[in-house]
Image (spheres, rainbow, N blue to C red):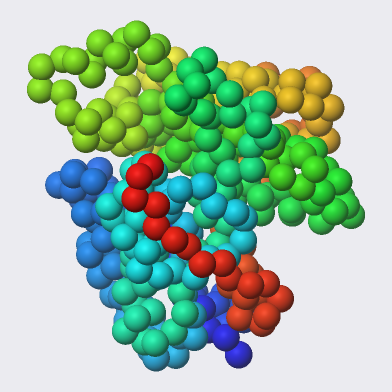
Amino acid sequence: MERLLILNPGSTSTKLAVYDDETPVYTESIVHTPEELAPFDCVADQYAFRRDLVLRSLEQHRIPLNSLTAIVSRGGLLPPIEAGAYRINEDMVWQLRNRPRNEHASNVGAMIAYDIANRLGIPAFIYDGVTVDELTPINKITGLPSMQRKGMGHNLNTRAAAMRYAREQGKNYRDITVIVAHLGGGISVNLHHNGRIEDFITDEEGPFSPERTGGLPMFDVIRECFEPGTTYKGMMKLVKNQGGLMAHLGTTDSRKVEERIAAGDEHAKLIYDAMILNIAKNIGKIAPGVCGTIDAILLTGGIAHSDYVTEGIKHYVSFLAPVIVYPGEDEMNALALGGLRVLRGEESAKTFHRVENL
């Protein structure tokens, strides 16, 4: 029997689970308030804070560390990688600490996994990392040769949702065409076609979300960058952690926003409805890549639990294809199954090599 520790750090929580083969022994989502995360200048600085919470959770649930046989983490923002498993090594930890592709909470997952795995002498992996990039060449082109669009984001959860849809339809993943919108602390939209994620609207160009700005008017962004006292780190923190609902309404909790709307807060309703419309616009924006020939639109992620949000999106996009809601995330199970396939020899883990000049 394999006993796996599964780690999935998100922008507002650290999710963890212990699996005995395919069976979850326990799962937990440790919520981090904005006040707890405010002292940290960057995600890498949160490493020890989140690691200690993971170790405390294992102790509280009476899981002996020496009972673990492997650790699987959500992958961080590495340079472009292939789908599947990578064994966590020194190069990967160095990359995520010193030269990540961008700031993201998942960057600390591999660091925590590598630390604990080294103590125990067991392997640690990432699976379907955030920077799996399968965009077709035409979808990478922008208005500047020096800048390309990137296929990075919620690959793990959206692929799991697409594969679930394929199973339920009795089809192979390669034979379906679906648009998947991940609705969480960050929001992204992608297109699955021919067994690949051929197009991807990331949270830096797509809808605003509970804590991210999404796409912004470029001229205003340029002007903001040259305001006195503005720094690169400050701007990154603004667009990744202090935008969206947080900027407009002072909270990243969509449930609290809906409570305010129910209590008659018209401003909260305007902002929340604008977020929903933004999501719908981006679903429509990605559809021309397959000439609108779509089997289904899938809504997943934590905010997909909200009928207010999902019904609002359906109102705008149902003319394109049936809308199916898979609330929550299947990421923990997807990570566990991916790790098991490697441990059982059904897949091979790739080796990551650092890239110093990104």
Q: Nearer the viewer, residue 259 or 45?
A: 45
Q: Nearer the viewer, residue 187 or 175?
A: 175
How far from the left and from the top, in percent, is residue 64?
Answer: 38, 89
Q: How many tags in the picture?
A: 0
Compared to residue 182, the image places residue 342 above or below, namely below
How far from the left and from the top, in percent, is residue 221?
Answer: 31, 15
The residue most toward the left is 229
On the rendered image, what quadrant is the C terminus found in? top left
Compared to residue 114, the image places residue 63 above or below, namely below
Q: Is residue 351 left or right of residue 102?
A: right
Q: Nearer the viewer, residue 72 or 347?
A: 347
Figure quadrant of residue 299: top right
On the rendered image, what quadrant is the N terminus found in? bottom right
Q: Is residue 106 visible?
A: no
How far from the left and from the top, in percent, is residue 43?
Answer: 28, 49
Residue at position x 21%, y 54% in the image: 45
Residue at position x 44%, y 29% in the image: 204
